[in-house]
Amino acid sequence: MTRPLIGITGRRWPASTLGTHVPPAMRDIHFDLHFTDYPRSVALAGGLPVELTRDADAVEMVERLDGLVLTGGADVDPEHYHETPDANLGPLEPDRDAWEIALLAAARKKDIPILAICRGLQLVNVVFGGTLRQHVELEGSAGHPQWDVDGHEATHSVNVVEGTVTAKLFPDEIGVNSLHHQVVEAVGEGLIVSAKAFDGAVEGLETPNGRIVAVQWHPELLRKPDPTFVWLVGEASKHQSV
């Protein structure tokens, strides 16, 4: 059996964000941004990573995949959960929202496993009808966000919920990093909370059938091979044999 093909989403920015690293003639061109820890984590878990582009049909791409990773990044547009933007809302990427929502729908229809990370968890929650708290400060919280700490280091602990897929992957309490300023407010319909921080913030969500596992932290930056990526590749391998 070949290694399962795992699709990984990314961002799209104008080349002008690279400043003097590109000549003026190229500053209106866009580039796709993929942080290398995502594909490295997939590969170390035994999968074959592929970085996805939004220049092809989402359904057609997903038809070739055995698993999907929805990665971190920009805030989800509050329009998707019918709220007015908060003053502390970060830059939005509406094209990415639409693209990943289409990928998520196609992956669910094909019934392949989905690992959703940070923004990915928030997007999943919104797609299932949930809402987000648009901004949370470090003060008075369990430790989100921690922008000045190396993302490879754990900054606070979370407790996993017994009986969930996440609990099978981790012990009762784990150390995680914190690279987000938004958290789940209302949990989407049909989703199960699988992990929480000590301030009550949702740190993990999953579907009852275990096909979607979502975490608020960035596992790709922690120890490798990370249990969440091992789960994804393992489930994707099962999908190949069906």
Image (cartoon, rainbow, N blue to C red):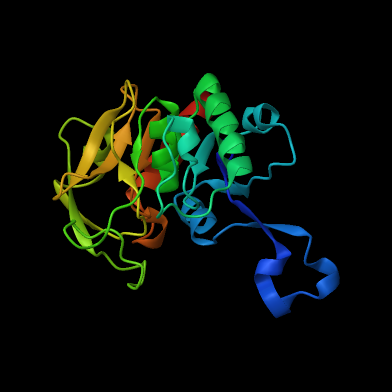
Horizontally, residue 159 falls left or right of residue 230, namely left
Does residue 135 sit above or below 4 in this rendering? Answer: below
Residue at image x 31%, y 35%? 205
State which quarter of the image contains the N terminus: top right
- For image coordinates 58% across by 25% down, the residue present is 106
Q: Which is nearer the eye, 136 or 23?
A: 136
The residue most toward the right is 25
Q: Position of residue 108 (x, y in %)?
A: 50, 24
Left or right for 154, reference 40: left
Q: Position of residue 141 (x, y in %)?
A: 19, 56
Question: In the rendering, at what x and y percent does residue 207 appear?
Answer: 34, 26
Identity of the residue furthest to the bottom in this view: 20
Q: Is residue 209 above or below residue 98?
A: above
**Position of 83 relative to 110 (above/below):** below
Q: How many marks?
A: 0
Residue 2 occupies which quadrant of the picture?
A: top right
Q: Residue at x 59, y 57 (%)?
A: 34
Name the one closer to the observer, 168 or 155.
Answer: 155
The residue shown at (74%, 37%) is 56
Residue 201 horizontal side relative to residue 59, left or right: left
On the image, the x and y values in percent for residue 198 come to: 13, 50
Q: Is residue 199 left or right of residue 61?
A: left
